[in-house]
Image (spheres, rainbow, N blue to C red):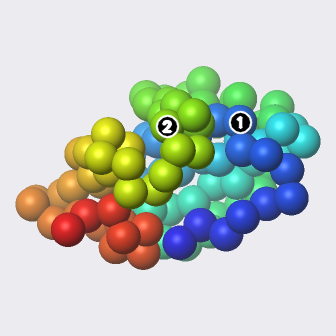
Amino acid sequence: MVPGAPSPLTRICIGGNNLVLLYADDRARLWDVKTLEFWRSMDIEKAKELLGQGSWTELSVAICAVCRTHSYFREQVASRFTSSGKCSNHALGLCA
């Protein structure tokens, strides 16, 4: 599970096993979704630099705000974190 933040979430970006959460206060957090490990916090400029270095997919924050069990959200996240038929993101409870 990804802990909350005092500032609203503005963007969610996924690249490989990495998840970048960007917030309205110009901060970002980088997570490894395979190990569920928090890697680092950074400012928005560093996050933009990181996102410019590779292939990232952005998920709509509006979808995430609806409900974490919303079927479209579940399908989108599960499809990105499925590896060899097994979901590697068990903590979010998104894969059956």
Report whether 75 appears left or right of 1. Answer: left
Report whether 7 appears left or right of 75. Answer: right
What amino acid does circle 1 point to? Thr
Q: Tell me the tag on residue 63.
A: 2
> Compared to 3, does 5 lie above or below?
above
Which sits in the foreground, 19 or 50?
19
Q: Secondary structure at mark 2?
A: helix
Where is residue 95? Give x, y as percent: 25, 64
Q: Tell me the tag on residue 36.
A: none
Mark 1 or mark 2: which comes first in sequence?
1
Q: Residue at x 64, y 35 (%)?
A: 11
Q: Residue at x 67, y 69 (%)?
A: 3
Quadrant where the C terminus is found in the figure: bottom left
> Compared to 19, does 45 lie above or below?
above
Q: Tell me the tag on residue 10.
A: 1
Cβ–Cβ below 8 Å for labels 1 and 2? Answer: no
Residue 93 appears in which quarter of the rendering? bottom left
Q: Residue at x 38, y 48 (%)?
A: 70
Where is residue 54? Give x, y as percent: 48, 30
